[in-house]
Each structure stands twice: as structure tokens, then as C-alpha cells.
Amino acid sequence: MPAKHAVVNTDDAARYLKRLCKHFSHKIEATWSDSQGRLEFDIGRCRLQAATTGLELHCEAPDQQQLDQLGEVVASHLIRFAGGEVDAVHWQTVTSPDA
């Protein structure tokens, strides 16, 4: 399953994690705590982790097209919610150990 990962540098990782999960919970299955979250979209899933380095995002989807779409949805919402603190999400491709 294709995957991508990003670390967004911010001092407000826990706040953005909660805000993203709460927002998406109105339309999809979303669970969260103060430091972890999970978003279950029809096209894939995204795990969120509030860390000392910032907000870690890990997305997986059945194919590359859906993964790209999922990454764009999560990133665009984070950028909007961050109100100028975050201007981009720089995704890194995660290679499968089976590849």
C-alpha cells in the first residue's frame, strides 16, 4: 500500500491534531487523544502524532492517485487551520519493506 509521511514544524501540534480530527469527524470516522489521531477516509487513512518536533502525519491509500488526493486533503486543511504558521506540507514517500 503506498504511503507518505511528513513532519510539520509547529509548537501547536496537539492543537492542530485535535482541530483536524474534530473537523473531519463530522464526515468520516476520526479518533483522537491529546497526542495521537486517526482519520479513516474512503480513499485511505491518516495517522497523526503530536511530537516534540511538530505534527507528524502518515497517510496510506490503496493506490498512488488516492494517496496523492488524501495528502492534499489533509495538507490543505492543516494549512488553513494553521492561519499562516504552516504554509506547506512537504511529503516524503515511504517505501515498503516488500518493495
Image (cartoon, helix red, strand yellow):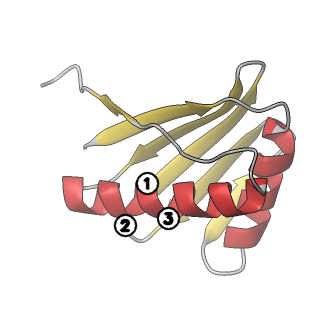
Secondary element under disc 1, as helix, strand or loop, is: helix
* Image coordinates for residue 83, horizontal then vertical, percent: 78, 57
Report the Cα–Cα distance between label 1 and label 3: 6 Å
Q: Quadrant of the N terminus?
A: top left
* Residue annotated with mark 3: 73
Report if the CB atoms under discs 1 and 2 are less than 8 Å apart: no
Q: Earlier in the sequence, mark 1 or mark 2?
A: 2
Q: Earlier in the sequence, mark 2 or mark 3?
A: 2
Residue 41 vs residue 55, the one in the foreground: 55
Q: Are marks 1 and 3 in contact (CB under 8 Å)?
A: yes
- The three-letter code of the residue at mark 1 reads Gly
User: At numbered mark 2, what does the secondary structure look like: helix, strand or loop?
Assistant: loop
> What residue occupies the far left of the structure in this picture?
99
Residue identified by numbered label 2: 43
Rendering quarter of residue 33 = top right
Visible residue check, residue 44: no
Q: How many marks?
A: 3
Kindly report the distance in space between the C-alpha atoms of the residues bearing marks 2 and 3. 11 Å
Which quarter shows the C terminus? top left
Residue 56 drawn at (x, y percent): 61, 33
Does the residue at mark 2 contact the one at mark 3 (Cβ under 8 Å)? no
In-image side of 77 versus 91 (left or right):
right
Distance of label 1 from label 2 (alpha carbons)? 10 Å
Give the camera-side residue of 70 and 96: 70
Q: Is residue 63 above or below residue 6?
A: below
Q: Residues within 10 Å of mark 3 (few under 14, many from 20)?
A: few
Q: Residue at x 44, y 45 (%)?
A: 59
Q: Position of residue 58 (x, y in %)?
A: 49, 39
